[in-house]
Image (cartoon, helix red, strand yellow):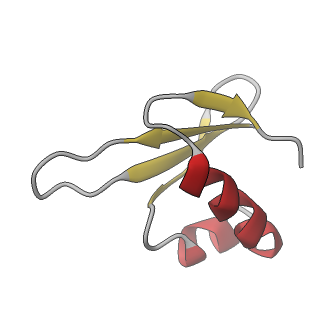
Amino acid sequence: MYIIKVKGVAKIPDYVQLRDEQFTLLAYFRVDRPEKHLEKAGLGDKQAYIMGLVKDLPFGRIIKLEL
């Protein structure tokens, strides 16, 4: 699984994308509101870990998540 942090502009907020090995979009959510989307993707129990990575992740950078 891969994670990408996308920078918002003006009134558009910052977003996070979670993608699988084939780069299919699994979840797309605002940085400040991840709860519902991570639960829907089945990653609610890993929310603290994922959001910890997102906090330090530079915009536009893709990293591989080892869950």
Q: Residue furthest right?
A: 67
Instruction: Pick the residue in front: 28 or 11.
Output: 11
Q: Residue 9: which quarter of the image?
A: top left
Camera-nearest residue between 23 and 33? 33
Question: Number of marks in the image?
Answer: 0
Whether residue 35 is visible, yes or no, is: yes
User: Which of the pair 19/62 is nearer the observer?
Assistant: 62
Q: Quadrant of residue 49?
A: bottom right
Query: Which residue ends up furthest to the top in the rendered image?
Result: 22
Q: Quadrant of residue 51?
A: bottom right
Which residue is at a point 68% across and 73% down the rendered structure image? 39
Q: Is residue 2 above or below residue 16?
A: above
Measured as percent of width and height from the top left, residue 41 is found at 68, 61
Report the quarter where the N terminus lies: top right
Residue at image x 43%, y 36%? 59
Say whether residue 56 is left or right of residue 53.
Answer: left
Residue closest to the far left: 10
Establish if 6 lies above or below 39: above
> Residue 28 location in percent, x, y?
48, 52
Q: Nearer the viewer, residue 52 or 22?
A: 52
Residue 43 visible in image: no
Q: Residue at x 64, y 26 (%)?
A: 23
**Where in the figure is residue 38, as x and y percent of width and height?**
64, 66
Image location (x, y in percent) of residue 54: 59, 52
Q: In the rendered image of this protein, does residue 24 appear above or below residue 55?
A: above
33 relative position to 19: left or right: left
